[in-house]
Image (tube, rainbow, N blue to C red):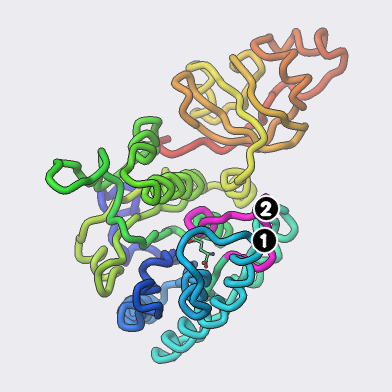
């Protein structure tokens, strides 16, 4: 049975798994130290998957949190240069902890530090992918983090949820596991005494699902769930299943396998090409095309997007930039590379293909987004 056709896929059915670990799980901020016993229990689970011939990659946060403890930095937001310097201190300790814990199982770790540019520029993206592929071929476990010491605020991920999703799509993983201090997506903010329900399976990320993430409790958890849903969009659009589960338990992967609480985000079964994965994971779409219901239907059957199906344009994009496609309810239905810059696109919106030549005075592509440059979201 393919993972997608089962309501809650089993961990053993995946071949290449990216596991994202949040800072709060790894670092005990009160004691100011690494939670060694917990890390050892997670690595036991990782070793089981590794022994079972699975490829495992780790995206680990915690560099800044560890450095806060070592350097005795005050609580609260750090300035950019402080965060960068703290990451330089914490990353050494973080990588060493992973390496030592994995080596207790005779597993080799390899550290990879990525910046946003490394994943957004196609040439660098392919480069990073080759390095990671080689590590996996050697049966090493890549331990990945954002290169916080050089990433500046304008050009950084800033959260490892989206970074992990991007990595998962880059290496054609089939599963992304997000371990954090929440055990999944709830239909409303969970609070003591209320009846908020955990959603076990999200077959497709709809506007309703997005609004649940937006409506979560504290400032912290709002940011947390929003970036997790963003990660879910990147992953599921590119053919990667995602599961959010709590890492507040020992052996958190075993807990998922044993049916513990979690939320699965499913991806459509049809594999997409590597180019399309790259489009799907593009983090900085330059604009949005709002399209009508007929166009949504047509795109879902594999057609290209014609100017006639576009109702409205947002953003400031050039020819070849990534844009989000939004359906009549405003929800994202896919992403693609647009064939016209914003000025020309504005002129041909809603017009028939025959009019395009007359309006623009030159023959461009009939399609505003060609099917080869288009990736539709989940639920196909
Ligand atoms: N890269 C940051 C760190 O290692 C963490 C980012 C995040 O928490 O998502 O401290």
* SS of the residue under disc 1: loop
Residue at 76% from the left image edge and 24% from the top image edge: 365
Where's residue 379, x and y in %?
40, 36
In the image shown, does 217 or 348 lie closer to the viewer?
217
Q: Specify few, some or many for label 1: CA neighbours under 10 Å numbering under 14, 14-19, or 20 or more.
A: some
x and y percent of residue 205 in the render? 39, 38
Magenta-colored span: 146-163
Look at 58% across and 71% down and name the residue there: 87
Image spot of residue 265 (x, y percent):
36, 47
Q: Position of residue 227 (x, y in %)?
A: 46, 48
Residue at 47% over, 44% down: 233
Q: Is residue 114 above or below residue 353?
A: below
Q: Dot 2 corresponds to which residue?
A: 155
The residue identified by callout 1 is 151
Say if the magenta span includes residue 152.
yes
Does the rendering let one see residue 139? no
**Would you say residue 332 is visible in this rendering?**
yes
Q: Residue furthest left?
A: 193
Label 1 CB sits under 8 Å from any ligand 1 atom: no
Give above or below for 362 relative to 369: above
Real-space Cα separation, disc 1 to disc 2, in angstroms: 6 Å
Cβ atoms under marks 1 and 2 closer than 8 Å: yes
Which one is nearer the viewer's eye here, 304 or 254?
Answer: 254
Q: Secondary structure at mark 2?
A: helix
């Amino acid at each position: 049975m393919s993972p997608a056709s089962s309501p809650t896929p089993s961990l053993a059915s995946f071949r290449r798994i990216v596991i994202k670990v949040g800072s709060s799980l790894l670092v005990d901020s009160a004691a100011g130290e690494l939670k060694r016993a917990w890390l050892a229990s997670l690595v036991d689970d990782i070793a089981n998957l590794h022994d079972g011939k699975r490829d495992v990659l780790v995206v680990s946060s915690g560099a800044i949190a560890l450095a806060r403890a070592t350097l005795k930095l005050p609580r609260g937001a750090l300035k950019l240069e402080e965060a960068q310097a703290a990451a330089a201190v914490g990353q050494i300790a973080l990588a060493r902890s992973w390496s030592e814990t994995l080596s207790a199982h005779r597993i080799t770790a390899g550290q990879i530090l990525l910046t946003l540019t490394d994943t957004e520029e196609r040439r660098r993206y392919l480069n990073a992918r080759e390095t990671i592929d080689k590590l996996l071929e050697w049966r090493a476990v890549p331990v990945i983090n954002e290169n916080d010491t050089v990433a500046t605020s304008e050009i950084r991920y800033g959260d490892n949820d989206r970074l992990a999703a991007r990595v998962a799509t880059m290496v054609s993983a089939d599963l992304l596991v997000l371990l954090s201090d929440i055990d999944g997506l709830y239909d409303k903010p969970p609070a003591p005494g209320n009846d908020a329900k955990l959603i076990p399976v999200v077959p497709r990320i709809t506007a309703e699902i997005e609004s649940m993430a937006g409506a979560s409790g504290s400032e912290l958890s709002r940011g947390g769930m929003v970036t997790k849903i963003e990660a879910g969009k990147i992953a599921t659009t590119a053919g990667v299943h995602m599961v959010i589960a709590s890492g507040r338990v020992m052996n958190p992967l075993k807990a998922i396998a044993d049916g513990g609480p979690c939320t699965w985000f499913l991806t459509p079964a049809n594999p997409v090409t590597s180019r399309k994965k790259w489009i799907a994971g593009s983090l900085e779409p330059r604009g949005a095309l709002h399209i009508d219901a007929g166009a949504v239907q047509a795109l879902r059957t594999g057609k290209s997007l014609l100017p006639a199906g576009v109702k409205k344009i947002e953003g400031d994009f050039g020819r070849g930039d990534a844009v989000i496609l939004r359906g009549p309810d405003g929800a994202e239905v896919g992403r693609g590379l647009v064939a016209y810059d914003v000025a020309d696109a504005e002129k041909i919106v809603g017009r028939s293909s025959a009019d395009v030549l007359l309006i623009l005075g030159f023959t461009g592509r009939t399609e505003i987004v060609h099917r080869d440059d288009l990736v539709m979201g989940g639920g196909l």
